[in-house]
Amino acid sequence: MNIAGVIFDCDGTLVDSERLAAGLLRDILEEHRVSLSLEQVLERFRGVQFALCMEGLCREYPWLPNSEIVNTFRARTLPLLQERLEEMPGAVEFVRGLSLPKCVASNGPRSKIETCLSTVGLLDVFHGLIVSAYEVDAWKPSPILIEHAADLLGLKPEECLLVEDSVPGVQAGLGAGAQVAGYGHDTDFSAFLDHANFHRVKNFGELKDLVQRIS
């Protein structure tokens, strides 16, 4: 089936926020006597509901004050993004040139999504077209978030292409019945390479070619 709309993940797909956020969490953990590398934090953090990420850390390091770390992380995140966030290479040009209906579906809270999009100059494109997991009470890998996003576009999930950089995100999209583009260089998508609805794209140039081919 040809696609009629595109659903974008935000962090690590449209905006280069994941390393900034993971670096912030690494620094906060260091303040509480937990030393992890940026890559170790990213492995736990990417595409995972933040509450679950913290639950895992607190099980492993029982002295961590969960609520305090969450509050500190939230308070420091938005100023950091406003100061240092950049688009993923080619994202803004691609989105602005895309004629298909489009929206954003993210595990993040709306305040973070809107801050990210505003900082790179995309908030106007997605005005009224954002689905936050916190507002539908469903986080990737649940397909429910993707179903809500498709509904926002007035489409069925099978009519949509989801652009994702994380394993839980790909699982959510495939579970909903969408076509899924596994984006970027850093994630191991090998488990999905044989799935008929999965497409590997390393950059927005390859994504453009894919969209032209299946729309």
Image (tube, rainbow, N blue to C red):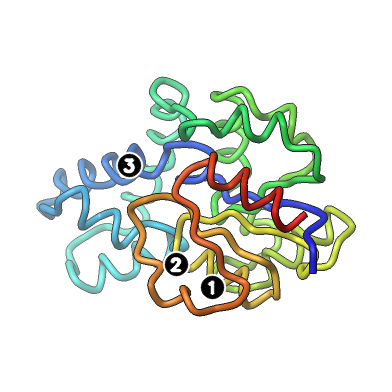
Q: Which residue appears at 44% of the width and 67% of the height?
A: 167
Q: Earlier in the sequence, mark 3 or mark 2?
A: 3
Dot 1 lies on which element? helix
Residue 123 coordinates in the image, percent (x, y) = 68, 29
Q: Label 2 vs label 1: CA separation?
A: 6 Å
Residue at the right extreme? 154
Three-letter code for the amino acid on which mark 2 is drawn? Val
Three-letter code for the amino acid on which mark 3 is drawn? Arg
Q: Which residue appears at 20% of the width and 49% of the height?
A: 29
Up-down: is 73 above or below 160?
Answer: above
Q: Quadrant of residue 195?
A: bottom right
Q: Which mark is residue 46?
A: none
Q: Which residue position holds label 3?
A: 19
Pointer 1: residues within 10 angstroms few (<14), some, or many (20+)? some
Three-letter code for the amino acid on which mark 1 is drawn? Gln
Q: Label 3 vs label 2: CA separation?
A: 16 Å
Q: Nearer the viewer, mark 3 or mark 2?
A: 2
Q: Is residue 116 left or right of residue 20?
A: right
Q: Are marks 2 and 1 in contact (CB under 8 Å)?
A: yes
Up-down: is 53 above or below 117?
Answer: below
Q: Which residue position holds label 2?
A: 167
Q: Which residue appears at 79% of the width and 63% of the height?
A: 2
Q: Which residue position holds label 1?
A: 171
Up-down: is 182 above or below 123?
Answer: below
Pointer 3: residues within 10 angstroms few (<14), some, or many (20+)? some
Q: Nearer the viewer, residue 173 or 159?
A: 159
Q: Nearer the viewer, residue 167 or 18?
A: 167
Residue 49 coordinates in the image, percent (x, y) = 47, 62
Q: Nearer the viewer, mark 1 or mark 3?
A: 1
Dot 3 lies on which element? helix
Residue 47 coordinates in the image, percent (x, y) = 45, 59
Q: Earlier in the sequence, mark 1 or mark 3?
A: 3
